[in-house]
Image (cartoon, helix red, strand yellow):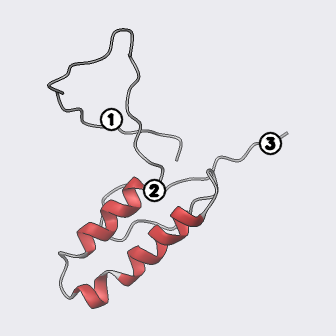
């Protein structure tokens, strides 16, 4: 997953530490988790959840850069692509 979508921020009552300009970064399997959550609301969860959950589990168990490239089941996003280094 080369592209990154912005992560929403919430204001903290304690504010930001001085000099801390780090931006949050979504987990590489975040879109797979969202696909599983969406599957929960698409009819019978016993039929809709197993497929997206299997891909989410494969993503969590994979090494960075080796995530599954199958398309999302319910999210309208392009499927993740593997970046191939030709050397």
Report the disc number at residue 6. Answer: 1
Which of discs 3 and 1 lies nearer the camera? The answer is 1
| SS assignment at label 1 | loop
Q: Residue at x 21, y 19 (%)?
A: 15
Residue 42 at x, y percent in the picture = 19, 78
Residue 5 pos. (x, y %): 36, 39
Residue that carries the numbered disc 2 in the rendered image:
29
Location of residue 46 with respect to 55 vertically, above or below: below
| Residue 9 in the figure: left or right of residue 71 | left
Q: Earlier in the sequence, mark 3 or mark 1?
A: 1
Q: Which residue is mark 3?
A: 86
Residue with the most extreme front position: 14
Give the Cα distance between marks 3 and 1. 29 Å
Query: What residue is rendered at 26% in x and 68% in y?
Result: 37
Distance CA(mark 2)–CA(mark 1) = 14 Å
Picture quadrant of residue 39: bottom left
Give whichever of discs 2 and 1 has the lower sequence position.
Answer: 1
Seen at 33% across and 35% down, the residue is 6
Label 3: how many Cα within 10 Å (few below 14, some 14–19, many 20+): few
The one of 7 and 20 positioned closer to us in this rendering: 20
Mark 1 is surrounded, within 10 Å at the Cα level, by few (under 14), some (14 to 19) or many (20 or more) other residues, namely few
Name of the residue lying farthest toward the right:
87
What's the CA distance linking mark 3 and mark 2?
25 Å
Residue at the outermost top position: 19
Q: Nearer the viewer, mark 3 or mark 2?
A: 2
Quadrant of the snapshot with the C terminus: top right
Dot 3 or dot 2: first in sequence order is 2
Quarter occupied by residue 38: bottom left
């Amino acid at each position: 997953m080369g592209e990154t979508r912005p992560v929403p921020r919430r204001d903290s009552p304690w504010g930001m530490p001085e000099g801390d300009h780090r931006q949050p970064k979504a987990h590489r399997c975040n879109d797979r988790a969202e696909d599983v959550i969406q599957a929960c609301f698409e009819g019978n969860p016993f039929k809709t959840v197993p497929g997206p959950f299997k891909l989410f589990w494969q993503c969590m168990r994979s090494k960075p850069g080796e995530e599954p490239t199958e398309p999302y089941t319910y999210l309208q996003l392009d499927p993740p692509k593997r970046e191939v280094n030709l050397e």
